[in-house]
Image (cartoon, rainbow, N blue to C red):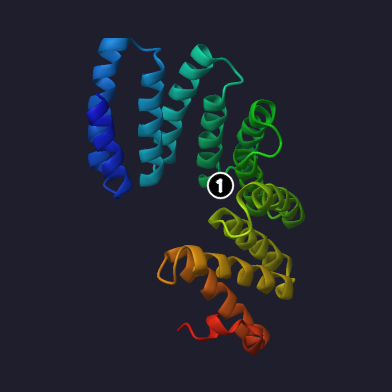
Amino acid sequence: ADLLSQLGNCEKKFGNYDKALEYYEKCLAIILKTLGGEHPDVATSYNNIGITWRNKGDYDKALEYYEKCLAIILKTLGGEHPDVAGSYNNIGITWDKKGEYDKALEYYEKSLEIKLKTLGGEHPAVATSYNNIGSAWKNKGDYDKALEYYKKSLEIRLKTLGGEHPDVAQSYNSIGIAWHNKGDYDKALEYYVLSSQIRFKKLGASHNLTKKSIESAKRLAKELGKENDLPEWMKEIN
């Protein structure tokens, strides 16, 4: 079963989701037969299958498996275990993808509550929760609320991960998008550049996220007539 799960993980990593599901389903069948229906390993299998369905874009199918996973871990690990927080987070992300932002917020908040209780207020996982909550508010069109949570996330990430971590770049990019949506384009440009600098340094010029950040910064700078204000290294990139 372990080998099947590892094979599933490999296929999922490379985007071969149907093949990944095949391995995960075989793994699940073995675990159910040998360990019964309420073992934590069964929950892990359900979670893996849920993630794969989410990656395939079938959010209802993903939710079905996430809910199965959650039911087991609540029963076996209790309501305040970090795995339960992870499960709530996965369900929240899926509702977010479905465009059900209030539902997403409900699960993100549940996840955050457990993380704060078990990990404390300055853990990177707490920063991830704040970022997710910020994104849901952004999707709802409440950009002030989004910025509030993005800034909380950024503060923790700067403190725990340092100023040049890719997660910090994600925070800067998210804040940039929120300012952009609010119509404060100068502020947006400032954060797009900050995000681009980290991604360029840490991920390289050819990375997709780096390209997207630079593209956002250059496009906005052009619209504002501020192309000359961009850093020299960015001007040299086509």
> Above or below — where is 41 with respect to 11?
above
Say which residue label 1 marks.
99
Q: Residue at x 26, y 47 (%)?
A: 16
Q: Find residue 196 and report its horizontal and vertical position in percent.
A: 56, 69
Q: Quadrant of the C terminus?
A: bottom left
Pick the quarter of the image with the N terminus: top left
Nearer to me, 160 or 7 = 160
Residue 113 vertical placement versus 98 (above, below) = above
Q: Nearer the viewer, residue 97 or 156?
A: 156
Q: Residue at x 30, y 49 (%)?
A: 15
From this view, report whether residue 110 is shown above or below residue 95: above
Look at 56% across and 56% down and name the residue there: 165
Q: Is residue 202 or residue 66 the one in the foreground? A: 202
Question: Which quadrant of the figure has residue 169?
Answer: bottom right
Circle 1 crowding by C-alpha within 10 Å: few under 14, some 14–19, many from 20: some
Residue 161 x/y as whole percent: 61, 50
Left or right of 50? Residue 81 is right
Q: Is residue 1 left or right of residue 98?
A: left
In the rendering, at what x and y percent does residue 159 appear?
A: 68, 49
Q: Which amino acid lies under the numbered mark 1 shown in the image of this protein?
A: Gly
Location of residue 36 (image quadrant)? top left
User: Residue 136: where, in percent of width, then height?
Assistant: 63, 47
Dot 1: element: loop
